[in-house]
Image (spheres, helix red, strand yellow):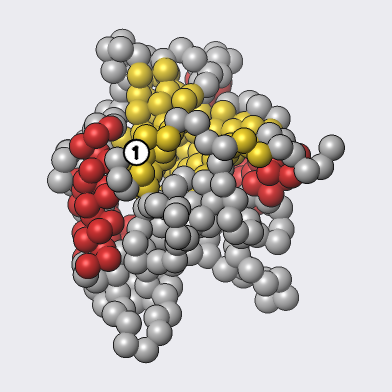
Amino acid sequence: MQHSLRFRQDHTFTITQFTDIHWKDGGELDQQSQQLMDMVLDAEKPDLVVFTGDIIYTGFVSPGTPECEHPAQAFEQAVHAAASRGIPWAFVFGNHDSEKGITREELMNAALSLPHTVARRGPQALSGVGNYTLQINGSEGEPAAVLYFLDSGDHAAVEHIPGYDWIRRDQVNWYAEEARNLRDRLSGSLLPALAFFHIPLPEYNEVWKRETCYGHKFEDVCCPRLNSGLFTAMVEAGDVIGTFVGHDHINDYWGEMHGIRLCYGRATGYNTYGREGFPRGARIIRLREGERTFTTWLRLADGTVVTEQPEHAPSVE
């Protein structure tokens, strides 16, 4: 079934972001993740669900710990909460989704066979798998907003550089070209846009240091060692008003820099590390037709809605 994304008659469009589910084997911890997602979707009734990576966990496990032996099946189970409700859903890959047992291409093929997905494979020639755009139409059917999805990779491919991968130059160029083409088709009009990927950009460090932020930072920003320029490209294009990532499970802050709000999701999955007193949950994003802004809040595992997060003052003038 092909879904068309569209603002409601009340001119709103609501997105639920689930991140870092780390589904493995359908065991007790995965079932807790399932219950959380069920609760959030029943409460929020979003127009789109976006999974921002590490949907499944196929990496190293300690001896005696269950592995993800059937990655495609695990992925299907992880997105079941959205698919079973008929809610359109999209996703980007994280660093743990295809570490072993399945490739990104194989997992994408499996995902595209599932009901109600609006995800796309994206251009074959680009780095990564799953670089694509989705358009949200207005309540009268005209183009009204755009969503960008990028594969942020896994580990750095350059031997002497440790740490995580970066969004490659060809992906940055692809984004800039997509933004330019869309603007040209709309005779210079600029639609509000959101961008989703898994690994945070280096600017997530910068915004915490230099701007007033809202939320928690309980671990280092595990961004790449290299800055490949995506944030600069977004500032230059002028369309993206918010970015949404996961990866760092006990960070959930957001802050605005140069007109773009850099947002973490709230880690959703129980089959991975967390922090005492920092419950799992989801980030909710609401666009309003015709406005270049959005509202966002958290819904936690106990049903609590968090609309105001604690303020953090900048440490660098």
Is residue 262 visible in this depiction of the protein? yes
Across and down, in percent, residue 258 comes to: 70, 30
Which residue, as the protein is rendered here, is positioned at the far bottom? 63
Q: Residue at x 32, y 82 (%)?
A: 65
Across and down, in percent, residue 163 comes to: 63, 68
Relative to 120, does residue 226 appear above or below in the rendering?
below
In this view, the residue in front, 233 or 311, is: 311
Q: Is 107 on the left-hand or right-hand side of 215?
A: left
In the structure shown, which secondary structural element does the residue marked by tag 1 occupy? Answer: loop
Which residue, as the protein is rendered here, is positioned at the far front? 277
Q: Is 83 on the left-hand or right-hand side of 167?
A: left
Across and down, in percent, residue 41 comes to: 25, 39
Amino acid under disc 1: Thr
Tell me where residue 98 sits by quadrant.
bottom left
Q: Residue at x 41, y 57 (%)?
A: 20
Relative to 233, does residue 224 appear above or below in the rendering?
below
Is residue 129 visible in this depiction of the protein? no
In this view, the residue in front, 4 or 266, is: 266
**Mark 1 lies on residue:** 304
Q: Residue at x 31, y 22 (%)?
A: 6
Tell me where residue 82 sits by quadrant.
top left
